Amino acid sequence: MPEKVVEVKNLHFRYREDEPLIEDLSFYVEKGEFFGILGPNGAGKSTLLRILLGFIKPQGGEVKLFGESLDNFNQWKRIGYVPQRFSVEKSFTGNVGELLRAVAPKEKVGWVIAFLHLENLLNRPFVKLSGGEQQKVLLALALTTNPDLLVLDEPMTGLDIHAQEHIEHILKEVAKDRTVIVVSHDVGFVLRNARRILCIGMPFCKVIKPEEFQNLVRDLYRLHP
């Protein structure tokens, strides 16, 4: 049996008592899998990632990372997280080289700079970079510990087509030797890359294969002929 990097059983979460956001959700992510999460705005996609990363606690259910309960898990260097670019843009002061040196172990800085070809960005302020350049830097920060699991929240948002293609190429390379979980509004990107997809925001959340998505798209996005 393949190793399960993430296991979620009967997860419940709500911001308001009378409005459950995530209800009785169960799924798993296998080692080496590119796993996509799709759903309409407000379905709880980013909230789910924040629960998996221990930022917020659910009201019920169980989460395991690498076979260990989230309550006891402390191997956070095994997980790299790429947040939504717009959520961190203004808080990242300083230039790219300073950011990398502040986060990365010294012996890893050179590797991640070379891998993502960041040499020409090191002396530039993060806030002055283009969207694609900022996304590369956030990816670099997440990769500095050489994590076994990479979690990305909307990596394509706000990027032009050329930047999207470049980031997608990088993620394909990254996914060759690690597990990747991606939340994205870019349905095409997810369908091209994910082995399986968690569709949330429907009466019954489902994990499907990409070829099954067409049958669910109307329900998922509440579209009607």
Image (cartoon, helix red, strand yellow):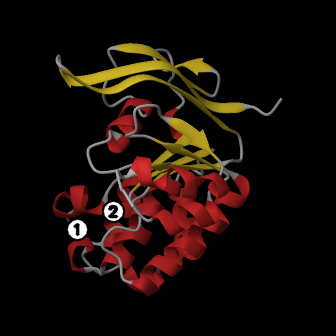
Residue 111 image-quadrant placement: bottom right
In the displayed orientation, state which residue is furthest to the right: 1
Q: Nearer the viewer, residue 181 or 79?
A: 181
Q: Do the residues labelled 1 and 2 touch (CB within 8 Å)?
A: yes
Q: In this view, does 49 lie to the left or right of 109?
A: left
User: Distance from label 1 to label 2 (Cα)?
Assistant: 7 Å
- Residue under label 2: 99
Q: Residue at x 52, y 39 (%)?
A: 77
Residue 78 visible in the displayed image: no
Residue 59 image-quadrant placement: top left
Q: Which of 17 and 141 is in front in this view?
A: 17
Q: Give coordinates of residue 141: x percent, y percent.
A: 43, 58
Vertical arrangement, residue 169 with respect to residue 221, above or below: below
Label 1 residue SS: loop
Q: Give coordinates of residue 118: x percent, y percent.
A: 47, 78
Q: Residue 94, labelled with which disc? A: 1
Circle 2: residue type: Leu
Vertical arrangement, residue 189 with respect to residue 36, above or below: below
Q: Which residue is drawn at 47% across and 82% down?
A: 119
Q: Residue 59, labelled with which disc? A: none
Q: Nearer the viewer, residue 40 or 103?
A: 40
Label 2 residue SS: helix
Vertical arrangement, residue 214 with respect to residue 147, above or below: below
So how many labels did they put on this image? 2
Quarter of the image with the C terminus is: bottom left
Q: Give coordinates of residue 28: x percent, y percent.
A: 61, 31
Rate crowding at label 2 as few (under 14), some (14 to 19) or many (20 or more) other CA atoms within 10 Å. some
